[in-house]
Image (cartoon, rainbow, N blue to C red):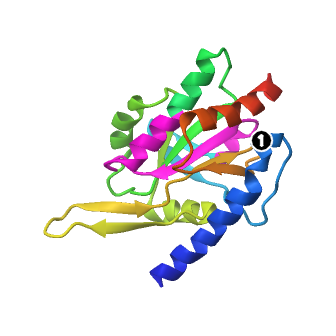
Amino acid sequence: MKMVRLGLWVVVFVAALFVGNRYFMTGQQAPLADGPGGPFTLTSHTGAQVSDSQFRGQYMLVYFGYSFCPDVCPLDLQKMSVALYQLEQEGYDTSPVQPIFITIDPERDTVEELATFVPDFHPRLIALTGTLPEIEAVAREYKVYFAKRPQPGTDDYLMDHSAIIFAMDPEGQYVRLFSSKDKPADIADSLRTVLQKAG
């Protein structure tokens, strides 16, 4: 059953990568039927209630991960941050782009824990947590896979999860994704296109 879920997610991933990437490269909307994304209301690292509707008019860069992640998550968030810093150094106003981190480990990623986590990244990064059912609902909307992986001989655990940065347009619709193969310069190049139009 687990392999079936993973297989279905791979199909969605490939379709999204093939169809959605046109938007930032050409500036033309490339809709994907039943693509990633959907409404959410979660709790931020400041304790405030945050809904996706608050970001209408902005592009969202959405990443699912967890603060206890030993490698991939901090690297991906750093990649997102470096892309924004690069654009700011070039003189762009990056406020039309909102970076968002959604935990897939709400058991450990409390508001207090996330508040100590976000300062390592871009200052406008918003980290979100919630109850497990709330997180599961958002993950389904974004077609994100995650599962707890217990560590033998200990009470500790890691989280297996999709490592994708989703780019959502000012209407909250999916436009493309960035995978582990994309570098900060690739993200900056794509964002530069929409920031030029916004400016």
Whether residue 20 is visible to the viewer of this picture, yes or no, is yes
In the image, residue 82 above or below residue 48: above
Query: Vertically, is 160 above or below 168?
Result: below
- Report the residue that reaches farthest toward the left: 153
Q: Position of residue 46 (x, y in %)?
A: 45, 35
Viewer-closest of 22 and 57: 22
> Where is residue 121 shown, x and y percent of the image?
44, 31
Residue drawn at x 49%, y 29% is 122
Is residue 14 found left or right of 155 in the rendered image?
right
**Residue 20: image location, x then y, percent:** 74, 54
Is residue 21 found inside the magenta-colored segment of the image? no
Number of marks in the rendered image: 1
Give me the residue at 34% from left, 58% from top: 107
The residue at 66%/46% (across/down) is 167
Furthest residue in direction bottom, as rendered:
1
Residue 157 position by quadrant: bottom left
Measured from the top left, where is residue 37 in percent x and y?
A: 67, 57
Q: Which residue is most to the right? A: 28
Where's the C terminus, which quadrant? top right
Q: Residue at x 18, y 64 (%)?
A: 155
- Region rendered in magenta: 52-80
| Numbered disc 1: secondary structure | helix
Give the residue at mark 1.
25
Image check: 149 left or right of 3?
A: left
Residue 72 painted magenta: yes
Residue 44 appears in the rendering: no
Residue type highlighted by circle 1: Met
Q: Residues within 10 Å of mark 1 (few under 14, many from 20)?
A: some
Q: Quadrant of residue 97?
A: top right
